[in-house]
Amino acid sequence: MQAFIDIRPTLASADAMGSWLPAAFAALAAVCVVVGVYSVTQRMLQRYRALYSATAEAGFGEVFLFISAQQVWQVSMVGCVIVGAAAVAMTGNLYIAALSAILFLRLPRWLIGHLRARRLRRLESQLPEALRTMAGGLRSGASLAVVMRHMAIHVDVPLNQELELIQREQRVGVTFVDAMQHMEQRLQSESVSLLCASLRVAAHTGGNLSETLDSVARTIERRTQMTERVRTLTAQGRLQAVIVGALPPVLLIALSVVAPQDMAPFWYTHEGWAVLAALAVMETAGFLMIWRIVDVEI
């Protein structure tokens, strides 16, 4: 008789294959998902880095601070790590650390806005005297190009930077009217817009340019004096806005350092996070409301 064939090893191997095959497919799918997420995240990070670096570099270039995009990105990343580590050490909450690091990424834009506003105020304060000097040079018989070249040498920063840039544009073939229009678009100031409009009208229609410059100088001077007066009268309101916005976060951090156990529910519970979120919303709304009231347009 033919001997019986023992098929039990074959069945055991089939069961073993059936047990590890789904696990292998699951592991392969997990690897594919991880690789896909990593590639997408890397592309998004590279795109964000390029946009962030280009925006920061262009903003610093507007205030004549020529910093490379690589330096801006490196300083921002190092600052994010330091701020995040400090937030973890102070609060022990990863969510607050991540939020602090993200807010630090906005620092270059805030810094650019502050430097740009300060530079613009200084330039507007220089304009009246510079325009009177230019008008005097025109009355003495000098041409506008000679007067502007002289002004670019003897005036202080930042007005000399703008005048030198206008002269460089004219050397490469840009007309005087277009160069003034570029300065107007670059600075976005009402005083500069008034000056550029007056020079464009004088270039097209003719007339006494020295009298035009004197008139523009008086107008800009009166406007600057009014602006400074309004800033002086609203200084108390701006200080109140800063105090109202800074006092609660400072007290929150100080109490967390002095009494960490009493402040722990704010940092480690969902209810505390909700209270902190409501506090942040109300603080931001109060600060913006006060700042809106004292921000008077001239």
Image: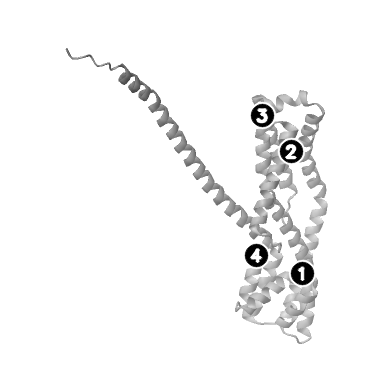
According to the image, label 3 marks what residue?
273
According to the image, label 2 marks what residue?
86
Coordinates of residue 38 in the picture (x, y in percent): 51, 42
Whether the residues at callouts 4 and 1 have beta carbons within 8 Å, the answer is no
Give the amino acid at mark 4.
Arg
Q: Residue at x 76, y 74 (%)?
A: 131
Q: Residue at x 78, y 76 (%)?
A: 153
Mark closer to the observer (1, 3): 3
Count numbered badges in the picture: 4
Which structural element holds mark 1?
Answer: helix
Residue neighbourhood size for the residue with mark 3, other residues' Cα within 10 Å, grouped as few (<14), some (14–19), many (≥20): some
Whether residue 208 is visible here, answered yes or no, is: no
Q: Which of the two labelled residues, at mark 3 and mark 2, occupies the earlier sequence position?
A: 2
Mark 1 vs mark 2, CA separation in Å: 45 Å
Whether the residues at callouts 3 and 4 have beta carbons within 8 Å, the answer is no
Q: Which mark is residue 186?
A: 4
Mark closer to the observer (4, 2): 2
Mark 3 vs mark 2, CA separation in Å: 19 Å
Relative to 131, is 186 on the left or the right?
Answer: left
Which structural element holds mark 2?
Answer: helix
Whether residue 87 is visible here, answered yes or no, is: yes
Give the amino acid at mark 1.
Leu
Question: Is 205 drawn above or below residue 253 in the view shown?
Answer: below
The single residue placed furthest to the left in the displayed view is 1
Coordinates of residue 157 in the picture (x, y in percent): 77, 67
